[in-house]
Amino acid sequence: MGTALFAHVENHEFPNNCGDIYMKLAMKGWVWRIPVLSKTSIGVVVNREHLQQYGDTPEERFDNYLQKNPKLKGQFEGIKRVFGIQKYSN
């Protein structure tokens, strides 16, 4: 079963074309980046059991998954969430 955690953030620079939607495979999941006006929607979809090792709260899991995942290293430094983490599970 998977869990999606996502938020809108500020201070994220897109690697190429700022109008494109990006998806990237990560450890036991994947990440999206979607431009939304002056913000970016960033989300992670990860195996629920794997995600638990990144913290106790959705905020801890989101932040730690983005920062500690070797496939994502350095891609999300300096981002600032503009609202709380949203969570969906199936």
Image (cartoon, rainbow, N blue to C red):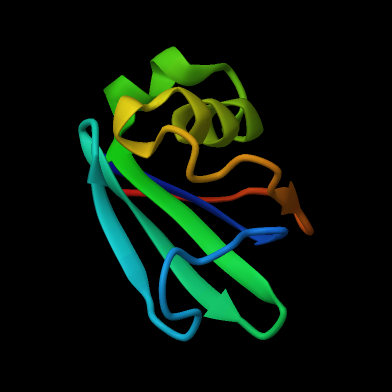
Residue 32 location (% of width, % of height): 38, 60
- Side of 51 where 28 appears, left or right: left
Q: Residue at x 37, y 76 (%)?
A: 21
Task: Name which quarter of the figure residue 20 lies in.
Answer: bottom left
Task: Name which quarter of the figure residue 76 lies in.
Answer: top right
- Side of 37 where 44 appears, left or right: left
**Above/below status of 8 relative to 69:** below
Q: Is residue 82 visible?
A: yes
Q: Residue at x 37, y 27 (%)?
A: 69
Report the residue that reaches farthest toward the front. 16
Q: Residue at x 62, y 40 (%)?
A: 77
Q: Quadrant of the N terminus?
A: top left
**Above/below status of 88 relative to 41:** above
Residue 45 location (% of width, % of height): 33, 47
Between 88 and 51, which is closer to the camera in this rendering?
51
Residue 25 location (% of width, % of height): 21, 47
Q: Is residue 84 visible?
A: no
Tag count? 0
Between 14 and 88, which is closer to the camera in this rendering?
14
**Above/below status of 6 relative to 50:** below
Residue 16 location (% of width, % of height): 41, 72
- Side of 72 where 7 appears, left or right: right
Between 44 and 16, which is closer to the camera in this rendering?
16
Q: Residue at x 29, y 62 (%)?
A: 23
**Above/below status of 54 relative to 17:** above
